[in-house]
């Protein structure tokens, strides 16, 4: 059974022409053996509504340090029993990932021992080396490079290098087109720090799952990437069906 | 996990079902969807040599309105209920609740009758139906859901009896109904249904049902009494009612959390659910 470390719910029609509602994500999970995972949207209250009714589905707090009251909102949703970490999108929201305002969010996560997933792979704010500054400043923070560099091989290689240099950095596979880079990441960074993500509805789970299965990894390592590593990071137990 | 062997009897009438159940006694059980029963058999928690499949009994299917109630045949699936134009028009809160039951695979196969007869304490429909004063029908008699659900995995049905329909009174216009739950695992950790009617700013009817946290879903009678007659926006009364509902639910420790934690969940869900119901009533 798969753990998906990167899902979206809600409407993204204006910019991307896609949307996925509560029932849609429920059906996608059922249809692709995704028994658990994390989901996010800038409207955290909507995400709470969705995750409360779908077993196995958990939220990440979408935090935007450019908004007034961002810390209070983050605190509120991190107290929700179905929120397991944070999502940052410095590209869309327009800030540097190592901005002091972000440090305050990371401190919240450190107090709770929760991970943060950061969109990674687009200039100017989400290049792997920019996120590395944050990882170096907070060596105990668990930082996931969402898309592990995304569509550009320079950034993909950069993301793998950053994870290699920083043991607190994890790589998440969604939207990254080169299946062979998943195997390379596991071989170079280690078998526990590469996580499967689908990035629904922007990418299809079938394609994203196939990438991992065709990556050249052994069946045991495929299962580790598709299921165990996400559970270990978010549930603190690689075999768990829910947080311990 | 593999299913142990059994003989499947597809019957065409309630009488035929009763005859088979009587003939095979404790070695026979009714199957009506099987999303729960087959799991039990696979896990070895139950063993039957004969399963009597009642899904083919035509009179037990269908949804209709009769004498002010929505009447749902016991073999109607959750999916049929959530998509039924009649339910969407006359009792949309039921369709909304059903749309949140388990997942699409379970909803497509599982039936309302099967769900109630299994009497899992973590049942969304049971909590909902309790709040709406629904009744179940078998042997030509109607029994309130509150008396039908005796305890965990135990109902008032005796061996050989077959649930035929569920009668759900249609609330008068201006009634707000809301159902909420919180689910970590396959079965919800807490389920709450609230119903309310408001006249001149006062609550004239308040009903709260809480499920999934204790041995069986219950009505929070004291909480309802506290709310009835108070102002619809009285937050203090609502907070007190939420405490009483948590107490009435008699939560137990299990994989979803401690009794203390589940009491907290109930308080939070009751407050939210009641706010939803109030908004629905106002709309």
Image (tube, coloured by chain):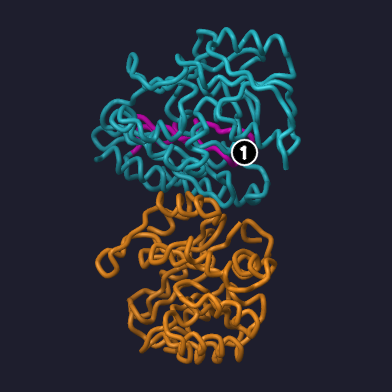
Q: Whole-percent x and y of residue B122?
A: 58, 38
- Residue B203 makes an appearance in the image: no
Q: Residue at x 35, y 19 (%)?
A: B64
Tell me if residue B147 comes above or below residue A29 in the rendering.
Answer: above
Q: Residue at x 55, y 42 (%)?
A: B246
Residue A27 in magenta stretch: no
**Chain letter, colour orange:** A
- Nearest to the observer: residue A94 or residue B7: B7
User: Horizontally, is A153 left or right of B92 in the view?
Assistant: right
Residue B214 in magenta stretch: yes
User: Horizontally, is A134 left or right of B161 in the view?
Assistant: left
Q: Residue at x 37, y 76 (%)?
A: A64
The magenta stretch spans which residues? Answer: B203-230
- Nearest to the observer: residue A223 or residue B221: A223
Q: Whole-percent x and y of residue A72?
A: 42, 71
Q: Residue at x 51, y 50 (%)?
A: A30
User: Horizontally, is A68 left or right of A109 in the view?
Assistant: left
- Residue named by callout 1: B214
Location of residue B190 by image quarter: top right
- Residue A32 makes an appearance in the image: yes
Tell me if residue B268 comes above or below residue A216 in the rendering.
Answer: above
Numbered disc 1: secondary structure: loop
Q: What's the colour of chain B in the image?
A: cyan
Q: Whole-percent x and y of residue B249?
A: 57, 38
User: Horizontally, is A26 left or right of A139 in the view?
Assistant: left
Quadrant for the N terminus of chain A in the image? bottom right
Chain containing the residue with disc 1: B
Q: Whole-percent x and y of residue B187?
A: 58, 44
């Amino acid at each position: 059974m798969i753990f998906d470390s990167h899902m979206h719910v809600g409407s993204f029609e204006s910019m991307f022409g896609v949307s996925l509602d509560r029932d849609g994500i429920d059906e996608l999970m059922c249809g692709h053996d995704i028994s658990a995972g994390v989901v996010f949207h800038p409207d955290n209250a909507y995400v709470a509504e969705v995750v409360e009714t779908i077993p196995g589905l958990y939220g990440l707090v979408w935090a935007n340090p450019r908004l007034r009251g961002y810390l209070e909102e983050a605190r509120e949703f991190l107290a929700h029993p179905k929120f397991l970490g944070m999502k940052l999108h410095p590209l869309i929201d327009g800030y540097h990932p190592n901005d002091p305002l972000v440090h305050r969010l990371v401190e919240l996560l450190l107090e709770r021992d929760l991970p943060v997933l950061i969109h990674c792979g687009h200039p100017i704010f989400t290049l792997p080396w920019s996120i590395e500054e944050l990882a170096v400043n907070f060596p105990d923070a668990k930082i996931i490079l969402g898309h592990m560099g995304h569509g550009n091989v320079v950034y993909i290689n950069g993301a793998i290098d950053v994870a290699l240099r920083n043991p607190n950095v994890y790589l998440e596979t969604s939207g990254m087109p080169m299946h062979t880079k998943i195997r390379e990441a596991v071989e170079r960074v280690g078998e526990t720090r590469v996580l499967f993500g689908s990035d629904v509805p922007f990418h299809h789970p079938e394609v994203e799952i196939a990438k991992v299965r065709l990556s050249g990894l052994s069946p045991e390592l495929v299962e580790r990437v598709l299921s165990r590593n996400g559970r270990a990071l978010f549930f603190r137990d690689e075999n768990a069906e829910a947080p311990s | 996990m593999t299913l142990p062997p059994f003989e499947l009897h597809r019957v065409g009438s309630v009488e035929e079902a009763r005859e088979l159940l009587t003939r095979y006694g404790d070695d026979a059980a009714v199957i009506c969807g099987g999303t729960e029963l087959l799991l039990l058999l696979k896990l070895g928690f139950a063993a039957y040599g004969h399963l009597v499949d009642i899904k083919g009994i035509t009179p037990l299917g269908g949804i209709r309105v009769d004498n002010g109630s929505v009447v749902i045949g016991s073999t109607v699936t959750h999916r049929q209920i959530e998509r039924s134009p009649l339910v969407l028009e006359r009792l949309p809160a039921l369709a909304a609740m059903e749309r949140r039951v388990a997942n699409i695979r379970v909803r497509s196969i599982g039936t309302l009758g099967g769900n109630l007869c299994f009497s899992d304490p973590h049942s969304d429909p049971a909590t909902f139906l309790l709040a709406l004063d629904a009744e179940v029908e078998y042997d030509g008699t109607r029994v309130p859901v509150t008396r039908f659900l005796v305890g965990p995995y135990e109902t008032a049905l005796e061996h050989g009896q077959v649930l035929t329909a569920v009668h759900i009174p249609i609330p008068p216009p201006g009634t707000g109904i809301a159902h909420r739950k919180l689910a970590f695992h396959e079965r919800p950790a807490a389920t709450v249904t609230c119903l309310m009617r408001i006249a001149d700013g006062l609550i004239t009817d308040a009903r709260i049902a809480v499920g999934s946290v204790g041995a069986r879903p219950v009505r929070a009678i004291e909480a309802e009494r506290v709310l009835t007659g108070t102002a619809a926006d009285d937050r203090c009364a609502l907070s007190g009612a939420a405490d009483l509902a948590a107490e009435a639910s008699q939560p137990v420790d299990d994989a979803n959390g401690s009794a203390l934690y589940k009491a907290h969940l109930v308080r939070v869900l009751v407050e939210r659910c009641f706010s939803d119901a109030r908004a629905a009533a106002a709309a």
